[in-house]
Amino acid sequence: MDWINAIVQGALLGGLYALFAAGLSLMFGVMRFVNLAHGDFIVLAAFGALALVETTGFFPFWTLIALVPMFALGGYLLQRSVFNRITGQDLLPAILVTFGLSVILQNVMLEAFSADSRRIPAGALDTAALALPGGIGVGIVSLLMFLAAVVSLGSLDLFMSHTRSGRLLRATSDDQEIVGLMGANRAHLFALATAIAGALIALAGVLMAVKTNFDASAGPVRLLFAFEAVIIGGLGSLWGTLLGGILLGVAQAVGAQIDPGFQILAGHLVFLLVLALRPEGLMPRKA
Amino acid sequence: MIPRFLLIGAIVAVLAAAPWWADRGTIRLLVEALTLLALAQLWNLLAGYAGLISVGQQAFVGLGGYLLFSLAMFAGVPVLWALPLVGMLCALIALPVGALAFRLTGPYFAIGTWVIAEVFRLGFAQVGSLGGGSGISLPVGLVREIADGRGAREALIYWLALGLAVGVTLSVWAALRARTGLMLGAVRDDAEAAAALGVRVLRVKFGVYVAVAGATGLVGALAFLQRLRITPEAAFSVTDWSVVVIFVVVIGGIGALEGPILGVVLFFALREVLSDLGSWYLVILGITSIAVMLVEPKGLWGLLTRHREVRLFPISAPLPRSLR
């Protein structure tokens, strides 16, 4: 029964990993750009929520009302001011600038919030659980987190397939040059993708802050989880990313069940196994 | 040609005599600088010339350190003999590791190498006989066998570090002047055209990856031979073996052999000045390297030689005056 419980908890945690991954995957899909500071921005959102809760005393989830628009706007401006200058054929500037940004963010957060591990308490919600048959308890926070992931990925999917902006973003993903020639504003489209990624980062950060412990140096590992979910699921597939996140979460939970020191390692090993056996991922987007 | 070799030779000679003119603290600092120089040259070859941007070279630094300790402690190999063996083993292990990493391209290759380094770190933390997460020290008996007394041992490690830094720099230079360099240059300028001319692009890049991994392992072995103690955190540190190395190359000048040398000198000067600032010094380094990347992607060396063609390590013949 412990094992089934571990698998259920892992699968729910996988929803959070899919949220980590969605922004990363969207940006790579639209402009072949990977932000190595992605995880650090998630942690920044978590600290932002913590600071808001501590100063205002609001319920943690209300911070989303402030943080989601803030991160979306921040993403838009960051793309237009800096990232657009380094998005292109040459990979080196993009990787090195965002890697530098990651180091800066980590150390600034370290100075601002110390190295202590933190979590935002959500009152009665922390211990509230849904009792399933067989003695399996599903935490309400975990369930909300998973639902938020499914709803966000679903909305993103609808946005991409049914709106004019979504169609333009998909067209950019297929051929940046042609979209530019057709009169679309590439700089704006890129920034739009980063704005959506920013909103997803804020959501992921707040949920993470309530669900798990985090500290100033927790960003890179979040980036690795996001990346692993994307690759396991298959590039360019949103629902594949959800599946990838779930598989990663289950692998970690089962690993932790074997030996607590084995949790993160088990996730990495499943990722490497998928990379070795099925490098195109489990649900690759059809060409 | 002669003045260049005289200059390089003179610098190396002065450095080789350091055990007679420098105190112990300086020697230790020099070992650190030479180790960093070797790692920076290797990363520069990988990223600046072969286009393989890795943020996971700490995998091989740590592996080299752990292999050295394991060979000396469990296989009874004399420490100094273990060093070349470590280099070869690291290159051998890089074959399957590289085969996995090469399934990813571009930015995802970078993150993939990072995951692999994390797997190594978490894996070695699980090995009880190597001290698990808290690490292990080289037994005193083995340390005594290295050399007669502490002074002699530290001088020996210093000369090894100097030899390694000079050797790596000259090997990279030689490789870039030979066929490999021509092929890498062709691939960098236009991968498809190079492939059409018969360059086996992946094979060349894979060869560079494996050779760099072997040399990186050797540097790691020496770094932890100097420290005499190894822990998973120190062995696979992203900050020490990737962040600092990348900043040094970017600020000094990527894609030129002179860049890393300039970068290392600058890094140690900055570190002395900013040592009281704690983690702010990494923030300052980060901001500097982002600024360099946005303003002058060829770094300080690129800035210095923008209007004048100066090369300490030329890898191509200068353009005839009529074509300039």
Image (cartoon, coloured by chain):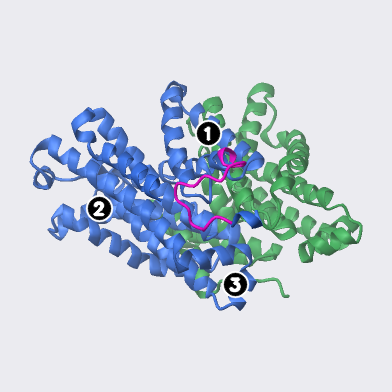
Q: Position of residue B265 (x, y in %)?
A: 42, 35
Chain ID, blue in image: B
Q: Which residue is mark 3?
A: B194
The residue that appears at 58% across and 45% down in the rendered structure is: B298
The chain letter for the residue carrying disc 3 is B
CA–CA distance in space, label 1 to label 3: 36 Å
Q: Position of residue A196 (x, y in %)?
A: 76, 48
Of labels 2 and 3, earlier in sequence is 2
Name the amino acid type tagged 3.
Ala
CA–CA distance in space, label 2 to label 3: 49 Å
Magenta stretch: give its range.
B303-319
Query: Residue A58 lies in magenta, yes or no?
Result: no
Q: Position of residue A219 (x, y in %)?
A: 55, 43
Q: Which residue is mark 1?
A: B285
Chain ID, green in image: A
Foreground disc of the pair 2, 1: 1
Picture quadrant where residue A105 is located: top right
Q: Which residue is mark 2?
A: B128
The chain letter for the residue carrying disc 1 is B
The residue that appears at 71% across and 60% down in the rendered structure is: A29
The residue that appears at 55% across and 36% down in the rendered structure is: B286
Q: Residues within 10 Å of mark 3 (few under 14, many from 20)?
A: some
Pointer 2 and pointer 3: residues touching (CB < 8 Å)? no
Of labels 1 and 3, earlier in sequence is 3
